[in-house]
Image: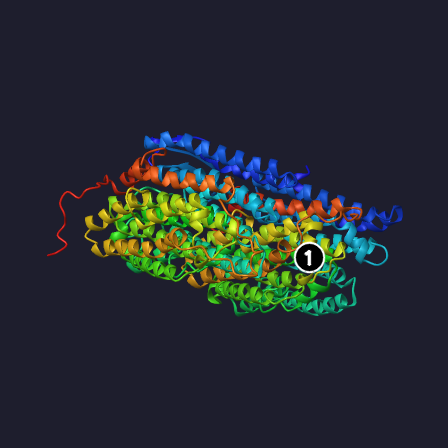
Amino acid sequence: MIAQHLPILVVLTFFAGALLMPLAGLLHRRAPWMVAVCTCFTATLAAVYALLHVAAEGTVRYAMGGWRPPIGIELVADPLSTFVAVVLGLLSLIVMVHSREPVEREIEGEPITYYASAMLLLGGLSGIVMTGDLFNLYVFLEISSLASYALLGCGSARASVSAFRYLMLGTLGASFYLIGVGFMFVDTGSLNMADVTAIFAETGLTPLTTLAVIFILVGMGIKMALLPLHQWLPDAYTYAPATSTALIAPIGTKVAAYVLIRLLYEVFPAEAIRHLHLLDVIAALGAVGIIWGSVMALPQKNIKRMLAYSSVAQIGYIALGIGLGTTYGFIGAILHILNHACMKGCLFMVTANLEARGKGIRIDGLTAELRREMPVTAACFTIAAISMIGLPPTAGFFSKWYLLLGSYEEGRWIYIAVILISSLLNAVYFFRIIERMYLGGGEEAPAQAPSPRGTALLIGPVLALGLSLIALGVGNLLIVNYFILPMLPFAP
Amino acid sequence: MNPSLSQESILPLVAVLVSLAAVPAILLSGRRPNLREFWTFAAAVAKFACVLALVPGALRGETAGITLLPIAPGVSFSLSADPLGVFFALVASSLWIVTTVYSIGYMRGNGEKRQTRYFAAFALSLASTIGIAFADNLLTFLVFYEVLTLATYPLVVHKETPAAIRAGRMYLAYALTAGLLFLAASGWLYARTGSLDFAAGGIIESGMFTGGEMKVLFMLFLAGVGVKSGIMPLHSWLPAAMVAPTPVSALLHAVAVVKSGAFGVLRVTGFVFGPDTMVDYGLDTILAVFAGTTIILASMIALRQDNLKKRLAFSTVGHLSYIVLGAAIISPAALTGSMLHLSAHAFMKITLFFCAGAIYVHTHKTEISQLNGLGRSMPWTFGAFTIGSLGLAGIPPLNGFVSKWWLCVGSLETGREWALAIFLLSGVLNAGYFFPIVIRAFFFAPPTPVRGDEHVHHPHGEASAWMVAPLCTTALLAVVFGLFPNFPFPFFELAEHVVEAVMQAAPTAILPELPSIVP
């Protein structure tokens, strides 16, 4: 009974949560936070159930309001979409649990609007993931974008400026996507993804299709912050409130990457992809992004900005995996969506903890005293850093391993060099911080500073993600075998 | 590995885990030093017991192992104790016990800070060393190899002086790059052959790679293991890392870390490429050129060092390449010598480092030119130093002579007279840089105290028993292994098993007929 409604369940949960916020705000000062946590928990449960159900029974298709596709809107729960939905749900749950203190500290006035925006963002993102309709995807894209402008822009004055810049570029991206979808509608007369695929198979390639494909890709490239369309990202992540960054950095760009995978491998005609060398272009952009992001991260003085540039590089890994177009490359890309979400979520929550202790986020402020005051946070930072560098047995190593195998399969030597060099660059900018934190200072434990209330809520989620990085590394093959292999768009 | 000879056993896993389990225990008992050191002892003894328990099986030619879980398609995280692994584990775990005793004497005698971090990192390093010894495939090997890099980093930067931090950065730069190249090589091998399991005699069959590709692949692997085994030009981190406390230099930079690299060379040459492939594609020549050059150059540089630990470090670089060169001379006798040198050098060089540390803690002297006459007040220390020096120069009846004999026989057996020349020349150079130290200590007059300098610490007598007892033990063992290669640990028999598995031939110590060197 529930199973047939699975595709809509995650999306609706988030929107219901957003609607409940004003009511919750009347009850208690902290009720919005609790509602947000409960919403994310329910949505995660729904997503996990969907993932398991789909793995057992196969894809579930859901016609909105009973209107049959291609007239009505269709939502699809298949291995790929449910997997991304689970990543999204889990990460949002962890970040929301962590968010109580940062939000109370950083957001002026009532937290109702903040949490309502967060729920709208998550609802929009999960909608993008679940939808099987090109125009409906645009609608969810706009919902999530508007919410993310609000989330990134609140707080400091600089945040509003950088969020405005993101708004301009983001709207541009969405418009490109819309124009592309428009062309595609003119071309095929349908907006349903499966329908469009079928029509393309019959009619073949027209110049209009090519144009549509290019528009859509540029639009998604902006949303995904794929080099050279990443300009909005460093500023937006640096100045936004800690929770906004921790929420948007791990999930936001990944959903755009998901759309790219969905469209490239399932909707766009293979002929167009081959003709335009799309996969090669995406892989090349990814490779350049890997190096460029890592190099830009090196000289940064602000840790959030450093992590933002590192995000550009990590998105490059995903793009590289997508562009390789082989089994291993695909596995690497999907696994990296999960791994990077956990790593970046962990790292950005660490920066939130630093801010909570009034430590600031300048790299030269990270000292041995800080590590002694916050041993768990520092340890989690180190684990996440090791995973970012890609040393075994952490999660980051294995996504790199699959990407390497994919590059070997295709004989792309340059990408192997790129992956290795990027690991070294990562080692340089992360060990710079680890060295600061672990060396120097006296030996004896500091006079126990009175820890602020709610410390467990700050440390627990960070620790959970830190440990998950080791678990994901050791158990990566389980994830690959049970969840990623069934979603392969081509025979392995 | 031959499945009929393999047995399910968790002992290799336990051997890795005991010192891993000691890490949190050490960290938590940081305020009670005696309890903390008890954990290290307990872990060291338990680890050694586990390894000893694996010896009888290895001597029967069996491989005890365990497959934990698959970590990548077609590759499992699995440990197996084959004779070669047991050999290396035996060296590392037995010396850990001795080093622990010495560490306590050194760290307390020297009043070092952050001893908790030191002992925890030490335990983690040993866990990964044993993991390297028992790794059953390249990916498992790589996991422990990288953990070893990270675990030894806190030990290198222990003093937290600018020099130590510089050395730490250098070490990370070298070791992480090496790990990445090893990863690249493993990925390539897997993409081409679909297997990463070690197998005696090699897993690469001819035809899988073209000649050029094979050379590139070999160079990648060589760079990966070459950094830790100090093959020139990848050795620079090792002399720099001498800023670490002396027990670290002793166990890690003479035994565990650098021997992991040398062990990696043996695994790669004997169990990945295999002797036939090595010869067919000319890989042995590449390896021999690097190793031979390293032996000579490192010995030359060692001659010019005045700092005692630096001289020992360059000597280590040279002796590690004995092992590498032994693997490059594809012959049963040379491989035997190579393995025996892995253990012989470990016992001798750790003795020398222990001596250097005892001298430093007791008299605060670090330079060789300051050692005049010190042998008279520290006879045990310098007696042990003399034994180690003689052994490394290859004087019978010490264990250094035995391993060198095998290496020399191997060079002649395969008609590589130049290798013989290198070994002999290196012996002379070893004598050249070690004997002056001994002569200074015993036969030069001690410096007369300069006026106004009387307050400077000029202690008499030996360093504390915590340091002297370990260094005498290792020196004694060096003599014993020279006389009885199978007592108390059956190093020779284990080496024989490895050689038979890899080369399908037993080593012979005396050449049936002397090859005609002079035509």
Left or right position of B210 against B34: left
Q: Which residue is mark 1?
A: A248
In the picture as drawn, the residue positioned furthest to the front comes out as B451
| Of the pair A290 and A225, the residue shown nearer to us | A290
Furthest residue toward left = B519
Percent from the top left, x then y, of residue A67?
68, 50
Residue at the image position 15 percent from the left and 42 percent from the top: B512
Q: Quadrant of residue B488?
A: top left
Q: Residues within 10 Å of mark 1 (few under 14, many from 20)?
A: many
Q: Residue under mark 1: which chain is it in?
A: A
Left or right of residue B465, residue A468 in this image = right
Which element is circle 1 on?
helix
User: How far across and down, in percent of the image, does residue B278 sit?
Assistant: 28, 52
Quarter holding the C terminus of chain B is bottom left
In this rendering, would A373 be left or right of B510?
Answer: right
Residue A49 can be seen, yes or no: yes
Query: What residue appears at the point 43 percent right and 34 percent down from the top-left corner?
Result: B51
Q: Residue at x 39, y 43 (%)?
A: B347
**For the N terminus of chain B, which image quadrant?**
top left
On the question of residue B78 being in view, the answer is no
Residue at 37 percent of width and 60 percent of height: B303
Above or below, comparing residue B135 to residue B451 in the picture: above
Counting from the top left corner in percent of width and height, residue A294 is at 56, 64
**Left or right of A154: which side holds A26?**
right
In the image, residue B113 sits, relative to residue A316, either above or below, namely above
Where is residue A31 shown, x and y percent of the image? 83, 46
Of residue B6 and residue A330, the one placed in the foreground of this image is B6
The three-letter code of the residue at mark 1 reads Ile
Q: Quadrant of residue A231?
A: bottom right
Q: Nearer the viewer, residue A244 or B396?
A: B396
